[in-house]
Amino acid sequence: MDLKAIVLDLDGTLLNSKKVVSPLTKNKLIEAQEQGIKVILASGRPTPAMMHIAEELKLDQYEGYVVSYNGSSVFDAKTKEFVYQQLISEELSKDILNHVAAFDVVPMVVIEDQIFVSDAFYDIDYPLPTGIKSVVEYESRMPVKPFKVVEVDDFNEVVKGPLNKILLAGRPDYLADNWEAISAPFDGQATSVFSAPFYFEFTDIGVDKAHALNEFLPQIGIKAENVISFGDGQNDRSIIEFAGVGVAMANAVPEILEIADEVTKSNDEEG
């Protein structure tokens, strides 16, 4: 394989259970970049919640990229510019937010340095890291500089333009039972996917991590056959299928384990 790029999901893949990159993995990725291999981070996270990891891995020095919001944006870590974006229109964003208000979920919308939510203390009845009191706190604290949490009664009052994505948090059992009803009205208009058992997300139609890769990799002379991708969640399916070699973490969900070309160790074992 003529390896030219390594694509890595973050949570459950590159990051261990403590949400950090282990020293060995960090050193190996820097060594790869020294050899001319591009490192590309691909996550459902907002761009600001990925940049401290990009900087730790020296992507700015070695011209790496950050694929954020499940593929709606691609950010050049060196030039500090977006090289690709595909957003949900304002009209469709409002339609989705109005529809999901009838379900037992908490929508989260990131606009600049703020995260707008319907309930800042929503309980998803699922274990979160020690010290974290709510899923909103968990999401808002991912950047080095946490998002400002703003509760809103009506999202129509704050959505004044297109959005990267709409994130829904809910109890895993409830989302498993209701995701089809949540997404059905927008079939053919938006893409929806689980990014965690307690997260269900909307992006614009056709958007996923592989779509973003397909949009910008040809610009830098890299083909899918030159890529190795690592992932663990349902929203990593596209990059596993896209890459010349798709690798599932040992802790991956069953459907990713089934389709991967290879299975490595878990995210807590330097996989």
Image: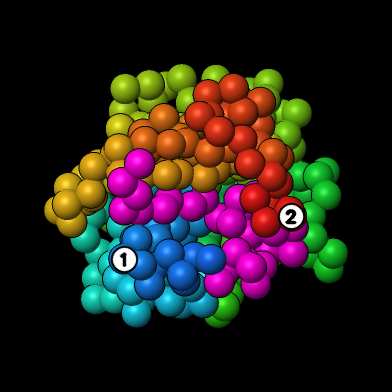
| 71 shown above or below 171 | below
* Callout 1–callout 2 Cβ contact below 8 Å: no
Which of the 4 quarters of the picture holds residue 194? top right
The overriding secondary structure of the stretch rendered in magenta is: loop
**Residue type (three-letter) at the residue carrying disc 2:** Asp
Q: Is residue 161 visible?
A: yes
| Residue at the image position 55 percent from the left and 43 percent from the top | 231
Q: Provide residue 225's location: percent of width, then percent of height.
A: 30, 37
Q: For residue 141: magenta?
A: no
* Of the image marks 1 and 2, the number of the one nearer the N terminus: 1
Magenta residues (range) = 1-27
Q: Is residue 44 above or below residue 103?
A: below
Residue 81 percent location from the top left of the image: 24, 70
Inspect this view and state whether residue 212 appears: no
At x 30%, y 71%, the residue is 63
* Closer to the camera in the image, 83 or 16: 16
**Quarter holding residue 185:** top left
Residue 22 appears at what percent x and percent y? 66, 67
Which residue corresponds to the image point at 61% horizontal and 28% vertical from the top-left? Answer: 257
* Disc 2: which residue: 268
Left or right: residue 207 versus residue 253 is left
Name the residue at 31% across, 46% down.
2
At numbered mark 2, what does the secondary structure look like: helix, strand or loop? loop
- Which disc is residue 147 wearing? none
| Front residue of 75 and 33 | 33
Q: Quadrant of the N terminus?
A: top left
| Residue position for label 1 | 36
Under mark 1, the amino acid is Gly
User: Looking at the image, is mark 1 or mark 2 nearer the viewer?
Assistant: 1
Badge 2: how crowded within 10 Å, few (<14), some, or many (20+)? some
Q: CA distance from mark 1 to mark 2?
A: 27 Å
Query: Is 232 situated left or right of 77 in this image?
Result: right
